[in-house]
Each structure stands twice: as structure tokens, then as C-alpha cells.
Amino acid sequence: MCRRSRLLAPRGRAQRILDIGARDGDPVRLVEQEGDDEHSNYVCLSHRWGRAPVLQTLSSNVSQHHQEVPWVALPRTYRETILFVRRLGVRYLWIDSLCIVQDDAEDWRRESSKMGTIFSQALLVVSASSSVDVDDGLFAECGSSFATHYLEHSLADGNVETICFRRSLAHISGYMDQRLGMTPDLPTLTRGWIFQERFLSPRVLHFGPQELFWECLEDSLCQCTCQGPSDRTSAPPDNVALDHVSQPKTYFSRHYWTTLSDSELELCWHRLVEEYTKLDLTLDKDILPAISGLAKQFQSVVNSEYLAGLWKRTLVADLLWHVDGFNADRDDGVQRQRPARWRAPSWSWAAVKGPVKYPDAAAGIISLCEVLDANCSSAGTDATGELLDGYLTLRGRLAAASVQHEDGDDTAAKPWQLLRLEFLRSTVNTTWADYDIRSGQDIISSGSEVFCLALGESPVSGAMYLLVLTTASFVGTGDSTTLKRIGIVQLSRPPIQSGASAEAWLQRLGFPQAATTIKIV
């Protein structure tokens, strides 16, 4: 199926590709794609750059690389990948650091926007999943503890039978199923860019610490044989909410998305965001470019405008994200603040650092506000890539509130332990701050006035969601209705309000009856 659906898309083709030759010893050189299908069969390398020096194509050496990329200059992972790809009988290889001119901002922006096509059209993606950096290599050594042992056994007819045995290999899928790769055993899969490289490609061969693991749209296979060929006659799992863990390669594929209902697609995108934001990026600005390929594929299914990681057709539901705790094991302080450089409007999950989560009730939320306008300005031609600015114009019920900082240990504070709103004191609620509002350039002092916008209501639990907003003074427009997001509230419906309408609940909370138009940046 994945071979039959592989159609070449010249307009999205990489500008350059490596010609690695057919035999060992052949020169490696960078070639330009010229519009025909001469280079249609190629392999991509998915790898982690790490801290080791990475050989890159730059403006100063691109001409030299067209002549030849010196073999001795190639890091170990690149050399071993080239040797492996030649054994497959494939002549062309795409490696990001060599096929994109890294110090040319326009070339990088243009080529990175093609990631969806580059990886989805590859014959195979080779993933150096267990490599820490480019010098770690593709092939792993299991060590003497996995050596093969032989046992001879005499049969009744006098013949001797030899039995071979060794220690069992650790099953790589066990690592990958835990937070989709967030373990030290598979360091490559902890990287944000790798996420879309894995799920865009029809076929991935992972080189793990002890075994090879194969993923494609139809099956998963491994050397240890824990996971063999699946039963093609079995029905797909009914519970799509769990499938992103049990079968991520299928769940995050366009082929699967085309089979889903609107509500299932909502849930699928929320799961994608949750998994992606657990991963690491070297450059903060890459938060949207690193999933632009997946966003384009998803957009072809949902047919909606893409807005800084959210979708216009499900905008209210997509606004319900909250920061999913601060990871004490990785916390160096930066995760508690917004990125130093602006990269997304405050209403986007891309505006915060660290993992985010959506409530289970987000899909199918009943909107309590009206979306009047939404717009994002791209830094280049790619609407799913890096942004310059963005805003939302909403009309809904807005109430003023007073911020109170929660008391507690600064080092242990969680996002739901930072913020308390006085007018909600008598309600059962969870209020998540988007960042540590007590310090830094975006500090919100205790006692400051903020605003709460009634966003939506869950048809299942009856929970109500409010956006917490503050005046966006940095905009310089003088418009008091221009706000920025600093958090979100989940209100649990009290028993006395169990049968009441959302309107009655809002009145009880003190929301004015008149709707207000606001702009959120």
C-alpha cells in the first residue's frame, strides 16, 4: 500500500541531494534536482546532531560540495549510513546538514518547508535512533554479553545437533511506546525535528541500541521477534484515544487521518501536540517549522486555515491547552518562562516552553464566545512555518478578576500552583498559569487586575473553561481591549448548578450580560 501511494511531487522536491555512488570508494557529491525523476529513489537520514561538530553545507563550501564531499570529513553516522544505503542499491541520500545551505536563511526557510514532501516521498528513512550525536555511528555493538553460545546434543541415531543460543535482545518498541521515545536509550527520538521525520515517512528503519526495528503504514517488525508480522485481517482498534501510544506510526499518518470523523480528527491533533511538545529543540524559533510537514498533511485532510499550531475550524477547542507541569528532572529555569524571543502569539501552545496538555473534553466543546477574526503573518512563504505576528478577535463574556500568587516553595511550584483568582474563591476550579508569572520579563504582580473570557463548556462533564488574560501593554496601540493570554481555568460545575444553563452559571459568577469584543495577541 505505501509503495502504491508514493507519488513524486516535483514542486516540493528537495533542491539538492547527495549522489553517494554505487560502490564503496565512489565520490560523494551534492547534486541539484532538475525536475525529472532521475533521483526519485532516495533515502533520508533521520539523526541527532548532538554536540559533536557537524559537517555542514555553507555558502562558502557549497561549490566544493558540488564537486565532492570529502569522505574523511564526514562524521561516522554519515559514513555508515552511506555504506548501508549503497548495500540497498540506492544511489541518492538526503541529509539535512548537507542538502540545505545552513547559513542561508532563505534557503533554510524554503527547504525546511519542504520536509513534508522530502520525507513522505523517500523510499526509506534510516533513523540513527540510539546515536547521541553524528560521531556516535549508525551501527550499535551489543557487547560480549550478547555473544552466541553453542550446545551440542547427541541424537538417538548418532548424529550431533548443535543448538545456538544467546541472551535475548531488548525490544526497542518498549522504549518507543513510552512517551513515544522519551528515554535515554533512544536519544534521537527525544528531538522535536525527529518527530515529523518519523511520522511523515512511509517506512522507517530504526537502528536501536540492540536491534533493528521497522515501522511502516501496514506493520511493525523487529529483530528480537517480540513484534512479528501483524494479522492483516484483524480490525483496527476501536479506541482511537489510546492508539497514539499503541500504534503511533499509524495514528499520526495522513492515511489514517482520512478515515476519521471530525471529532476524532480534533482529538488526533491534540494528541499530536501533546507528544510533540514533550520533545526538545535546540533553537526556540523552530517550534512551528519542526512540525510544518505534519501540519500540511493534516491540513489536506481537515481543509482549514492553520493558525500558529491551531485550526480555525476548531479554534475554541484548540485554545483549551494548558501547560502540563514543570519537569523537575530537566528544569533549568527556562521552562518556567516564555521563550526569550517571540515565536508565537500568546494564545498558541507554541508560545510556551515545555509539554502542554488538552482536557479530554476539548473535542466537541460547546463554544461560549464568537470568533470574529484570526490571522497570522508568516516570516516567509510557508504559512505553517516561522511567524512574525498573529492575533485573534473574539467576542464573548468578559469578567475582571484579581490575581493572587499562591504560597509555596518556588522550586517545586507547578503551573496550577502559581495563580489564584479572587472571584473564583468559592468555586471548585483548577487554574493553570502558562508560565511562572511571579518573575521574569512577563511578571504579573499579586493584586494585578486580569480578565477572564468565557471560552467554552464541556457537553459531557459540564465543566466550563475560561481564558485568563492581561493587558498587552507591549503592543503600544493604547487599545485597552488588546490582551494577551497568561493562563486558563477549568471550572467544575457545582451540584446546585447541575441542571442550570451556562448563562445562569455565568451570572452567578458575576459575568456581565453584555458581550465584549477583544483582540488577543
Image (spheres, helix red, strand yellow):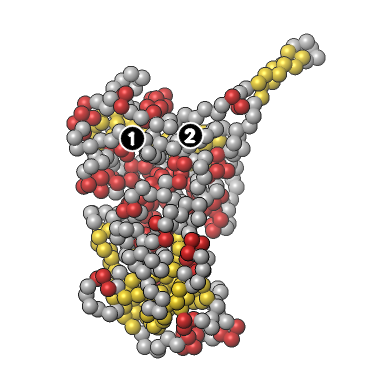
**Residue position marked by numbered label 1 in the rendering:** 53
**Considering only vertical position in the picture, is 11 above or below 302?**
above
In-front residue for pair 124/82: 82
Q: Is residue 160 left or right of residue 384?
A: right
Q: Which mark is residue 152?
A: none
Q: Classify the position of the C terminus by image quarter.
A: bottom left
Residue plotted at (28% across, 25% down): 70
**Residue position marked by numbered label 2 in the rendering:** 207
Classify mark 2: helix, strand or loop.
strand
In the rendered structure, which disc, 2 or 1, sits on the residue that comes first in sequence? 1
> Residue 176: where, in percent of width, then height?
53, 44
In-front residue for pair 360/35: 360
Pointer 1: residues within 10 angstroms few (<14), some, or many (20+)? few
The kind of residue tagged 1 is Pro
Q: Is residue 128 left or right of residue 167?
A: left
In-front residue for pair 262/73: 73
Residue plotted at (56% across, 74% down): 461
Across the whole image, how many numbered discs are drawn on residues?
Answer: 2
Whether residue 327 is visible here, answered yes or no, is yes
Residue plotted at (37% across, 35% down): 52
Classify mark 1: helix, strand or loop.
loop
Q: Is residue 91 left or right of residue 236?
A: left
